[in-house]
């Protein structure tokens, strides 16, 4: 199984920006995720872009069996990414390190959510690990 971990705008600044996102860099989180996945015989591909069109292009290219997406601020207004997600025919999980439901009103709405199978929010970097676990559980055939 190959899972794409797709991060959007400003997620590359994790560890350097507001403390609500934790003190680890995205590279450090990705390294932990890679180790986690290797123990489960899962291949991860990591993609991050601050450009909406690059995110859409990566989604349209496919080549993955599951998707974890943290689109950053694009979560709240990118109908282009939402439309691209609607075309992706694999299980998709939206993930957020902060609890978007407890933040500013504009952050409490996800335009991506209707095109994802689920959302993990507010668990810090563990949101990614939980999203990967869900995709593995779904692919195991034990749950659909």
Image: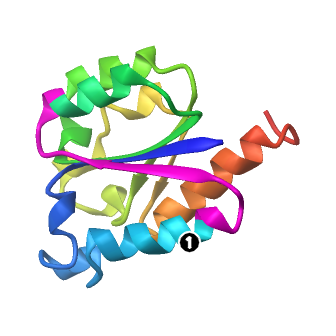
The residue under the point 21% across, 70% down is 14
- The residue nearer to you, when weighing 38 against 24, is 38
Name the residue rendered at 12%, 45% in the picture. Answer: 50
In the figure, 95 relative to 67: above or below? below
Q: Where is mark 1, residue-wise?
A: 35
Figure quadrant of residue 110: top left
101 left or right, relative to 80: right
Left or right: where 87 falls relative to 53: right
Q: Position of residue 124 (x, y in %)?
A: 40, 72
Is residue 27 toward the left or the right of residue 141 in the image? left
Regarding residue 124, the answer to whether it shows in the image is: no
Q: Position of residue 138 (x, y in %)?
A: 74, 41
**Residue at (59% x, 54% y) in the render:** 132
Relative vertical location of residue 59 with respect to residue 37 in this rendering, above or below = above
- In the rendered structure, which segment of residues is drawn in magenta? 37-53
Left-right relation of 6 to 23: right
Helix, strand or loop for disc 1:
helix
Q: Which class describes the residues within 10 Å of circle 1: few (<14), some (14-19), or many (20+)?
A: few
Q: Residue at x 21, y 59 (%)?
A: 11
Q: Quadrant of residue 89?
A: top right
Q: Is residue 52 magenta?
A: yes
Q: Is residue 49 visible?
A: yes
State which quarter of the image contains the N terminus: top right
Q: Percent x, y for residue 70?
A: 34, 49
Q: Is residue 72 magenta?
A: no
What colour-coding does the image apply?
rainbow
Q: Position of residue 7 (x, y in %)?
A: 29, 50
Q: Which residue is at the far right?
A: 142
Above-or-below relation of 121 to 111: below
């Amino acid at each position: 199984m190959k899972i794409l971990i797709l991060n959007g705008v400003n997620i590359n600044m994790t560890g350097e920006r507001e403390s609500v996102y934790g003190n680890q860099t995205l590279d450090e989180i990705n390294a932990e995720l890679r180790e986690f996945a290797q123990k489960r015989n899962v291949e991860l591909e990591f993609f991050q872009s601050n450009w909406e069109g690059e995110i859409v292009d990566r989604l349209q290219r496919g080549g993955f069996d599951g998707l974890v997406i943290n689109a950053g601020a694009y979560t709240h207004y990118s109908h282009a990414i939402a439309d691209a997600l609607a075309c992706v025919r694999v299980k998709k999980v939206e993930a957020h390190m902060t609890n978007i439901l407890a933040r500013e009103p504009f952050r409490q709405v996800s335009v991506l959510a209707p095109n994802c199978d689920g959302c993990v929010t507010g668990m810090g970097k563990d949101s990614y690990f939980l999203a990967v676990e869900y995709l593995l559980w779904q692919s195991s055939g034990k749950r659909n």
